[in-house]
């Protein structure tokens, strides 16, 4: 990210990819401007938050005009480093890992899983999607040689910390952790945790205890 982007609050920065994806769709359908109300409806973020977020990057929407889609896209591309491909590795080609490899992410932006790692003999040496699966013995070497910056962890939780330690040694910058393990990393490494079981449980809890008001009308 650029230095300017460093001043954006973290909560705003987390919403950037969401805005970016929607604006790309608008752009490809030929739209040149968008109102905060339209954006709000599409990305499900309230329009006051959108206006505040956008004011951080100097996009001041005009009343009755909205925001210029091209201006926003140029800003997002620069800020999210979309022009520069970030190399991603996936570790653990189980059910979840395989699903990610088949899905891949390149449809929406410049993020792509380049390479995968596992220890299972029936997986190492195969290709899933168009991604080759390497043995964990090669992890350190390949991550450094290929300049991999981000790792997605879909391994059993028991092995998540030792693998993380190796990734840190290999100079990885960020980890997307899908295991339930809470991982220790030095402050220079950014780690995001996505525990699908916790997310599901939390959704169900909210449904039970904070019902939405759609049925009260
Ligand atoms: P599967 O049905 O293929 O076993 P799963 O998602 O149910 O998938 P998990 O036990 O969660 O299985 O393991 C996920 C993947 O992580 C598997 O492909 C497994 O071979 C791999 N794995 C296990 N230990 C390691 C390790 N130390 N390093 C890298 N990958 C590992």
Image (cartoon, rainbow, N blue to C red):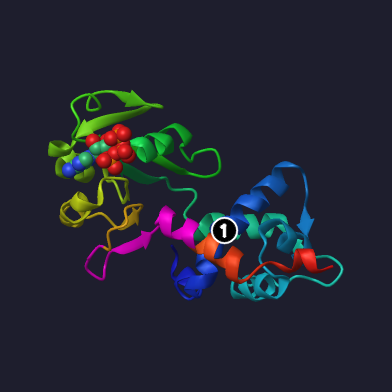
Kindly indicate the quadrant of the structure image that contains residue 197.
bottom left
Front residue of 95 and 167: 95
* Rendered-image quadrant of the N terminus: bottom left
Boundaries of the magenta span: 183-201
Residue 87 in picture, x, y percent from top left: 35, 44
Determine crowd level at label 1: few under 14, some 14-19, many 20+ residues with C-alpha closer than 10 A: many
Was residue 143 drawn as part of the magenta stretch in this picture?
A: no
Residue at horizontal 75 percent and vertical 42 percent from the top: 29
Q: Residue at x 43, y 53 (%)?
A: 196
User: In the picture shown, does residue 131 fall above or below 55?
Assistant: above
Would you identify the image quadrant in which residue 204 lies?
bottom right
- Secondary structure of the residue carrying tag 1 is helix
In the rendered structure, the answer to whether residue 45 lies left or right of residue 171 reads: right
Quarter of the rendered image showing ligand 1: top left
The residue that label 1 is drawn on is 76
Front in this rendered view, residue 24 or 130 = 130
């Amino acid at each position: 990210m650029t230095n300017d982007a460093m001043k954006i609050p973290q909560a705003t920065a987390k919403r950037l990819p969401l805005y970016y994806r929607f604006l790309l769709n608008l752009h490809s359908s030929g739209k040149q401007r968008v109102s905060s109300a339209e954006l709000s409806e599409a990305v499900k973020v309230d329009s006051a938050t959108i206006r505040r977020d956008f004011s951080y990057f100097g996009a001041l929407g005009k009343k009755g005009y909205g925001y210029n889609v091209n201006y926003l896209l140029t800003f997002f591309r620069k800020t999210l480093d979309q022009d520069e491909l970030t190399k991603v590795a996936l570790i653990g080609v189980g059910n979840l890992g395989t699903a990610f490899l088949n899905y891949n992410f390149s449809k929406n932006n410049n993020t792509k899983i380049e390479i995968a790692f596992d220890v299972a003999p029936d997986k190492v040496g195969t290709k899933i999607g168009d991604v080759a699966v390497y043995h964990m013995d090669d992890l350190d070497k390949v991550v450094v040689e290929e300049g991999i910056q981000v790792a997605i962890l879909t391994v059993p939780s028991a092995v998540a910390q030792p693998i993380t330690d190796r990734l840190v040694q290999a100079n990885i910058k960020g980890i997307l952790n899908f295991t339930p393990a809470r991982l220790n990393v030095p402050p220079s490494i950014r780690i995001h945790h996505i525990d699908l079981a916790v997310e599901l449980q939390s959704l169900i809890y909210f449904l039970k205890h904070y019902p939405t008001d759609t049925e009260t009308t």
